[in-house]
Image: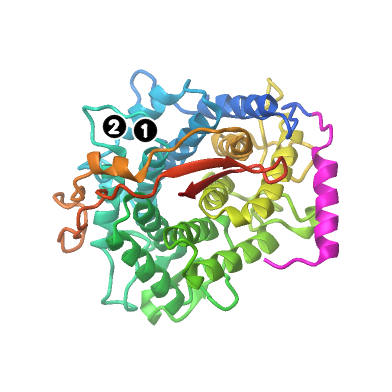
Amino acid sequence: MARTTFQNLLKVAYAAALVAGTVSAIDLDINNEQSIKDAAATAAFNTMQHYNGNKTGEIPGVIPSLWGEGGVLFNLMIQYWYFTGDASYNPAVSQGMYWQIGDDDYMPSNWSSQIGNDDQMAWGLAAMTAAELDYPQDVNQTSWLTLAEGVFNTQVARWDTSNCGGGLRWQIWPFESGYTQKNAISNGGLFQLSARLARYTHNQTYADWADKIWDWSASVPLLNNKTWSIADSTNVDNGCTTQGNNQWTANYGPYISGAAYMYNYTNGQNSKWKSGLDGLLNVSFETFFPEKYGGLILSEILCEPAEVCNSLEDTYKGTFVSDLALASLVAPYISSEVSSRLQASAVGAAKQCTGGNNQTLCGRRWYSDEWDGTDGREEQLSATSIFFANMAGFTGKGVATAAAAADQTTGSAGTNGTSTNGTGVPVALNGAGRSSQGQFGVATAGVLAGLVLLLVL
């Protein structure tokens, strides 16, 4: 994570200039808790104005034609609730999360033929977030942890050793376009979920899977553990020897977060995870925080400059911000470099949130002083994410302990259905969640560091 002293001084000066006295349509003082909370509330309101699943005649949890995006939406709105304390949207979030559970694996029958591994994982990670943040759950429903395990179990049953020695395909079904691809977002998502389950339950089976997925990713062109670049995909048709090298934040986030969780799970004793975390952060900082915008403001570089991002790509920054924040929670040593970028990006985002009749809609170009004319749900969701991520430095909340897992899980969710397209053999969990270790503590970093640090005592 080396930076020259001169570069660091320039960036600190730039950050200070950004955060000092900025006034915008979303008026944000990055050093003031209530101001950040108000900015997040405005963006969250604008986001949920686009969600119709809780209205009469609509299907809860469904984003039309983009089923997986519902999982992204709820994952980030759960974090919004946690960091701001605003429970206004919890009824809609909970209703949608429960409506789409399928056979406790987020493979609902009316969508299963269209679902890809990345789509299912979006919901699995939302359930994992709900478990970790102790999001309220209905005692008459399946627990959040069990739902996350259900997604894990169905996906590891699809692990394909007959092609390229392992890996998840992007798509589940052979008739879907993309079935021959093994991509970073699917394998990175399973890696992240495995690492988070390992830390939460203290079950070694999950850690073993995290190791396996990471090592396989590095054995094919997806994860280069020398340059620390992440390719978009590789293809079974050529033995996974080449890659599509488009650089998306969505591919880096899961591997960064997962490496941070494994760093925490191993108490920082395994250099593999620190090296990976540092390397991936360096590349993502250099790639997605372009120097031409000061080196601190996040940009989806492949589609933002030409304004050709599709709706799904407009969610990528929101999930990437979340992944960086999660990584900082469990690997505190990275928090200063991460939070300086989250703060500058939030200030940049607020400055251009001048769209719509209410003059608070946010566009996608956070580095611009002017609204770029984009006003969709996804742009508002990403703005919500960058605002609430900066609340972490002001909150002192506790987080559910690993011991709580013992009462929430059977370890076999997702193994009884017909949605695996694999062997259907249950994954042995060896008493998942029965450890009483791993109490979480919370510490607050300085104003510039600005992130809660979850420490294993």
Q: Of marks 2 and 1, which one's residue comes earlier in the chain?
A: 1
Q: Residue at x 35, y 18 (%)?
A: 56
Q: CA distance from mark 2 to mark 1?
A: 7 Å
Local SS, label 1: loop
Q: Residue at x 61, y 62 (%)?
A: 281
Whether residue 214 sits left or right of residue 432 in the image: it is right
Q: Residue at x 72, y 49 (%)?
A: 297
Q: Which residue is more in the foreground, 293 or 66? A: 293
Residue 341 pos. (x, y %): 70, 49
Q: Are marks 2 and 1 in contact (CB under 8 Å)?
A: yes
Q: Residue at x 81, y 29 (%)?
A: 23
Q: Which residue is more in the foreground, 404 or 124? A: 404
Q: How is the image coloured?
A: rainbow
Residue 378 pos. (x, y %): 55, 39
**What number is the disc on residue 271?**
none
- State which region is magenta: 1-23
Q: Residue furthest top?
A: 56
Residue corresponding to mark 2:
99
Kind of residue sitting beneath label 2: Trp
Residue 197 pos. (x, y %): 35, 52
Kind of residue sitting beneath label 1: Gly
Whether residue 285 appears in this view of the structure is yes
Quadrant of the drawing holding the N terminus? bottom right
**What number is the disc on residue 61?**
1
